[in-house]
Amino acid sequence: MRCLYLLLITSCFYSCKDRRDNITRLVNEWEGKEIVFPAHSIFTVQGEDTVLFSFSGADYKIVSYIDSVGCTGCKLHLPRWRRFMYKVDTLMNNSVPFVFYFHPKNIEDLCYITRRDAFTHPVCFDVSDEFNALNHFPSERAFQTFLLDRENKIIAIGNPILNPKVKELYLKILTGNISKTTTTSMTEVTLDKLKLDFGSFMYSEIQERSFVLTNRGETPLIIQDIITSCGCMKVRYDKSPVPPGGKLEITVIYKAEKAEYFNKTITVYCNIVSSPIMLKIEGSAE
């Protein structure tokens, strides 16, 4: 079973050979490793109410660590976590604890984000970064989330919020359907552009621009998920399958939180061999 998990985890990520080889090495290093938890962790709800939160004894647990590098708000994706947690709770009858350790750059900002996103699940604000000091997690956020067994050993690695294939793998392991595989017909796409330049604009103005994908294959194009690198971006698109020869417009809505130059990414997961597609936007909010 370990070899099967390894194969499936590796296949969840990018198709580039060098990238795949690096991921295989990382998965080999971490799969089966025991995660060590601090002896005394304080969990709070939105940074205010301290709560008793126990996750020992559970057959499975999902653990996510967020470091203080870069934009914390861009990394969290709390609304996506809420939806995923609800799905797991429904399937598993609330038997899978979600354990969050956040190493905040700014506690006030983190409290604001949890309140803004109505995230009421207990989290540990690990100011001293003790959790990372005990485990030395990978630096890439896509590999700072783990599915653990009862002994806190890693069964699978990867962030289900950032990758629909990882999400599917976690759900299969949790529900015991790991041997059930589905085959999706592949297609081919072309894009009118891979990068959008928003130019200069007043930061208070909401901006909209679009990418256009054309299905050049012989089977329908299916968008599995589109993930933005920052909460300041949203995307709008028709979720229906795109027939051969058809076009799909992906509209990017950007709302700057302050005046600054920005360079963001949109990751499109779909049924093409080279999935995901990486799109970029840039501009200057003044």
Image (spheres, rainbow, N blue to C red):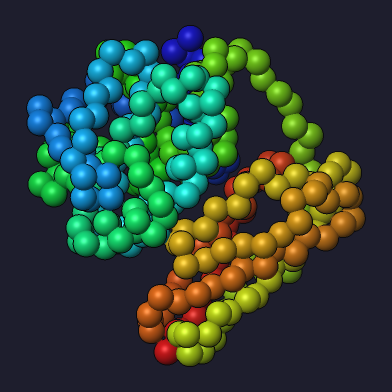
Image point (17%, 44%), residue name: 126
* Residue 97 falls in image quadrant: top left
- Locate residue 166, reporting x and y percent: 51, 33
Q: Is residue 241 shown left or right of residue 236?
A: right
- Depth order, front residue of 279/46: 46
Q: Is residue 173 shown left or right of residue 212?
A: left
Q: Is residue 256 shown left or right of residue 224?
A: left
Question: Is residue 263 depicted above or below 90 in this figure?
Answer: below
- Locate residue 101, reporting x and y percent: 25, 40
- Depth order, front residue of 247/189: 247
Q: Is residue 190 visible?
A: no
* In the image, farthest residue toward the front: 49
Q: Is residue 218 shown left or right of residue 137?
A: right
Image point (86%, 41%), residue name: 219
- Locate residue 90, reporting x and y percent: 54, 26
* In the image, farthest residue toward the top: 1
Question: Is residue 168 depicted above or below 76 in this figure?
Answer: above
